[in-house]
Amino acid sequence: MTNSIAKLDFDGKTHEFKVIQGTVGPEVIDIAALYKDTGAFTYDPGFTSTAACESKITFIDGDAGVLLHRGYPIEQLAEHGDFLEVCYLLLYGELPTKSQKEDFDYRVTRHTMVHEQMSRFFTGFRRDAHPMAVMCGVVGALSAFYHDSTDISDPYQRMIASMRLIAKMPTIAAMAFKYHIGQPFVYPKNELSYAANFLHMCFAVPCEEYKVNPVLARAMDRIFILHADHEQNASTSTVRLAGSSGANPFACIAAGIACLWGPAHGGANEAALNMLGEIGSVDRIPEFIDRAKDKNDPFRLMGFGHRVYKNYDPRAKIMQKTTHEVLGELGIKDDPLLDVAMELERIALTDDYFIEKKLYPNIDFYSGITLKALGFPTTMFTVLFALARTVGWIAQWKEMIEDPQQRIGRPRQLYTGAPERDYVPIAKR
């Protein structure tokens, strides 16, 4: 909705631009015609002040610590819903009815198998390959196996591709894990829930029965919910940018996985756990706290504070509760890293420096601890993030494809290189 006009005095002329107001959130100045009207671009490294799209999926208010999916607070979804219900909400805009939920669950469950030939694809990777490297390759290769769902102009094929990605990502992630640790692949079981099925594929072995602990399955499901979507972050923007060229959905999601791999994005929970390992023991915490407070020391506490949230990350509150539920269920009491984590948590929530700087423990801090307790190595943390975020990427990609305003992404630049000059033959250089 347009409420007012913004005026720009530039080069002796006054230019007017529409100011658009979303449902909630800050006003947005529509500068789509800026270059045409003025011959100038804007300069916004990281696009932190630029709305690159219009979206109805997720809203974040970092100052207030608010995260909404289709208007529903993340706290309510994580407390009362399950992951597939959140998937349905992100994809279709409304919470499902009972019959819609049953149908959606059925369709996802019946798509969890991957083409048998794909199992041979894994053997092309070195046995010590990072699971994220495997994920990038295997997800990108899905387009070579499922030609019947790569036509992005066909709504039915888009739906099939969406179902396949949501359903097969746990299977592919579990296969990457099994390959990484040298165990045989475990096939999905239709009678298990989404999260329980994933845990079964990761930790079952053919030689004995494995029963999924319902407390751990619920924790895994909650982790998936909390990572499902987070507005226009780096990986989501990558998926949208790749999709704007008309690339098939499997290639777009592979691009998102590649972006997520970065330690500043999806690798943050792995970095947080590595930091706990660097600290090593509770008695060394004061040393590292002093270093964190020293502006001249490059050391930074990973897993504290958030680029978007200037208040307590709403996901961290839920993840904190989940972490303690898992630790209590497993009876873990003598893990030095977890001892360090719990003491760091106590300090961050009571120390004036952390409170003043709003360096609260974030979701990466708690999810890293929880995933370690569940039995996953740090190399798998970002893989699990990618698994959960797949539905958000798909919902954002689907929304972009169906948006009549969407165009191929083409950011501009501020060029500071050499001006035009003539070629000099090599003998005269």
Image (tube, rainbow, N blue to C red):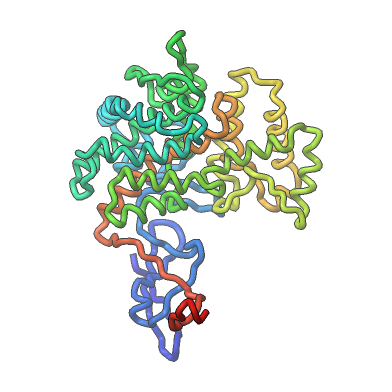
Residue displayed at 49% across by 68% down: 44
Residues 272 and 363: in front is 272
Is residue 98 visible from the viewing direction of this image?
Answer: no
Left or right of residue 302, residue 295 in this image: right
Residue displayed at 38% across by 22% down: 193
In the picture, residue 373 is in which quadrant?
A: top right
Is residue 347 visible from the viewing direction of this image?
Answer: yes
On the image, the x and y values in percent for residue 204 come to: 46, 16
In the picture, residue 103 is in which quadrant?
A: top left
Judged from this view, the residue extending furthest toward the front is: 427
Residues 47 and 417: in front is 417
How many numbered marks are there?
Answer: 0
On the image, the x and y values in percent for residue 377 come to: 56, 29
On the image, the x and y values in percent for residue 411 come to: 40, 66
**Quadrant that contains the N terminus:** bottom left
Residues 58 and 38: in front is 38
Residue displayed at 60% across by 46% down: 312
Left or right of residue 412, residue 161 in this image: left
Judged from this view, the residue extending furthest toward the bottom is: 12
Left or right of residue 332, residue 181 in this image: left
On the image, the x and y values in percent for residue 185 come to: 41, 21
Residue displayed at 64% across by 18% down: 331
Residues 195 and 74: in front is 195
Q: Is residue 350 above or below residue 334?
A: below
Q: Is residue 132 above or below residue 214?
A: below
